Image: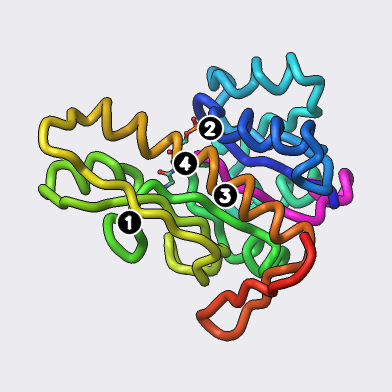
């Protein structure tokens, strides 16, 4: 299974996934990083790990559709089976979502459907929630909406700062995302309408 990771920023999830692949936990290969931000730290991480990088900047294309056509060209060229969004701060359009139906997954730093959007951790913190968490889900045409694969709660403790909460959320993400990809690669995820059934059995 050939994986493309899409990221725009630091790339700590990128590294966690890469580690799980290296350790043999995920039966697959990270074949491509798709990045839309030339200044993103994830680029250095990919370079160091000798992962092929496709830098695609929205400003170089007339429309979102043209931008996505180029992204799809990269995916096809590299025979990608699974797209993993890991802090890719761009909403995917219909071309990509339909073209890779049930083959795109995303991580969101809150318990969906709560606190959707670009600032899930801060929004839950500012709201005064007592529990937030992490969600891994399939991507459909609505933002932060597709069928949920895995979720993990993270308590917001009295005395937490945004930074201390962020650190615990990321720790949970780095556990949950590789596990979701491992299950996908093993063919253990069955989508039934809005629900994802996790098939039991070896592995
Ligand atoms: C992660 O916390 C991820 O959940 C979040 O961006 C961060 C990327 O961190 N994604 C979203 O908020 C999507 N709505 P990373 O670059 O260190 O992996």
Per the rendered image, the range of residues in magenta is: 75-87
Q: Position of residue 158 (x, y in %)?
A: 11, 37
Q: Which of marks 4 and 2 is nearer the N terminus?
A: 2
Residue neighbourhood size for the residue with mark 1, other residues' Cα within 10 Å, grouped as few (<14), some (14–19), many (≥20): some
Give residue 89's mark.
Answer: 4
x 36%, y 62%: residue: 112
Instruction: Find out whether the residues at labels 4 and 2 contact each other: C-beta distance under 8 Å.
Output: yes
Residue 193 falls left or right of residue 32:
left
Among the two numbered marks 3 and 2 on one chain, the one whose residue lies closer to the N terminus:
2
Q: In this view, does 200 lie to the left or right of 149?
A: right
Residue at screen point 85% across, 52% down: 1
Task: Compute the Cα span from label 4 to label 3.
Answer: 17 Å
Residue 85 covered by magenta stretch: yes
Q: Distance between the residues labelled 4 and 1?
A: 13 Å
Q: How far apart are marks 3 and 1 (CA)?
A: 25 Å
In the depicted view, which residue is nearer to us: 96 or 156? 156
Mark 1 — residue? 116
User: Magenta span has 169?
Assistant: no
Mark 2 secondary-structure assignment: loop
Name the residue tied to disc 2: 8
Name of the residue lying farthest toward the front: 202
Residue 195, above or below 29: below
Mark 4 or mark 3: whose residue is earlier in sequence: 3
**Ligand 1 under 8 Å from disc 2 Cβ:** yes
Q: Foreground: 55 or 45? A: 45
Answer yes or no: disc 1 within 8 Å of ligand 1.
Answer: yes
Distance CA(mark 3)–CA(mark 2): 19 Å
């Amino acid at each position: 299974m050939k994986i493309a990771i899409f990221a725009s920023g630091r790339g700590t999830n990128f590294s966690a996934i890469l580690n799980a692949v290296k350790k043999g936990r995920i039966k697959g290969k990270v074949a491509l990083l798709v990045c839309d931000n030339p200044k993103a730290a994830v680029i250095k991480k990919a370079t160091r790990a000798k992962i092929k990088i496709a830098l695609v900047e929205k400003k170089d294309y007339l429309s979102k559709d043209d931008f996505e056509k180029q992204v799809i060209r990269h995916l096809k060229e590299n025979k990608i089976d699974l797209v993993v969004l890991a802090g890719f701060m761009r909403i995917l359009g219909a071309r990509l979502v339909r073209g890779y139906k049930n083959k795109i997954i995303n991580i969101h730093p809150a318990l969906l459907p709560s606190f959707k959007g670009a600032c899930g951790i801060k929004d839950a913190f500012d709201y005064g929630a007592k529990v937030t968490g992490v969600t891994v889900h399939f991507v459909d045409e609505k933002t932060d909406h597709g069928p949920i694969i895995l979720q993990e709660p993270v308590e917001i403790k009295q005395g937490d700062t945004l930074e201390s909460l962020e650190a615990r959320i990321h720790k949970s993400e780095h556990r949950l995302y590789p596990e979701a990809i491992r299950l996908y690669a093993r063919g253990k995820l069955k989508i039934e309408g809005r629900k994802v059934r996790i098939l039991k059995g070896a592995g």
